[in-house]
Amino acid sequence: MGSDDKNRITLDIYGTQYKFVGQSSTNHIRLVAAQVSEQMHKIAVNFPQLDTTRLAVLAAVNIADEKFKLREEWEEERKARENNNELAQYRKLQSDHEQLKNEYRISMERVNEHKQKEQSLMDDYRKLLEEQETIKTEYKEAKERFETEKHGEHSIHENFRKLQEEYKKLQNEYNEWIELSERDQPRHN
């Protein structure tokens, strides 16, 4: 509405005619004037000795009081809605927090399981290294005996062959274990 689109209306408030000009609708202006007139009549019933000016001031005070009370009620309702929203958000955050705690606990259990597996694999690895060293020593000793007894008995050759086979088997087991160990190791970036 432009400045030329103002509504003009004449209304009766408590027996007096008033001309109103405004951008509000004529229905709105009528409702406002009726409210003021009604308030003045209510006050006049209880205080007939008051003149129109005093009645108008008391009516304005009553209307302003109602306005402030309504504003306070609206503000309390708004705060209650905000509190309800905040409470709902708090409960959602609590639920999310519990879920994250559970996920963290499960993750830590998995980490501990992997650490135990890793420790077990490392223990097995150490044992295999010890066995490998023992077999190397036995192999070296057997080889030395073989060298010194080249022309010795057939059983020495047979023992040497068995030790070599055992060494190959253990070497294969050791290599397989190393491959398994490397596959099971967690990747670190």
Image (cartoon, helix red, strand yellow):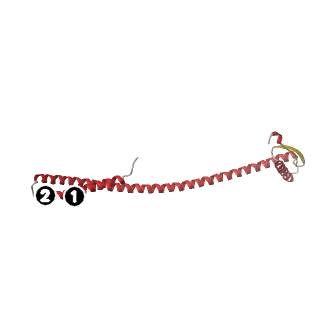
Residue 5 picture quarter = top right
Where residue 163 sits: x, y (%)?
19, 57
- According to the image, label 2 marks what residue? 156
In the orientation shown, which residue stands out farthest toward the top? 3
Question: Is the residue 158 above or below the residue 12 in the image?
Answer: below
Most foreground residue, 52 or 108: 108
Q: Inspect the image, locate mark 1, and give the three-letter code of the amino acid beneath it.
A: Glu
Residue 53 picture quarter = top right
Q: Residues within 10 Å of mark 2 (few under 14, many from 20)?
A: some
- According to the image, label 1 marks what residue? 166
Where residue 35 sits: x, y (%)?
82, 51
Residue 110 picture quarter = bottom left
Where residue 60 sits: x, y (%)?
81, 47
Most foreground residue, 160 or 92: 160
Where residue 175 sits: x, y (%)?
29, 54
Left/right placement of residue 181 relative to residue 22 reads left
Element class at badge 1: helix
Left/right placement of residue 108 relative to residue 140 reads right
- The numbered disc on residue 11 is none
Q: Which residue is located at x 15 percent, y 53 percent?
A: 143
Q: Which of marks 1 and 2 precedes in the sequence?
A: 2
Total numbered labels: 2
Residue 127 visible in the snapshot: no
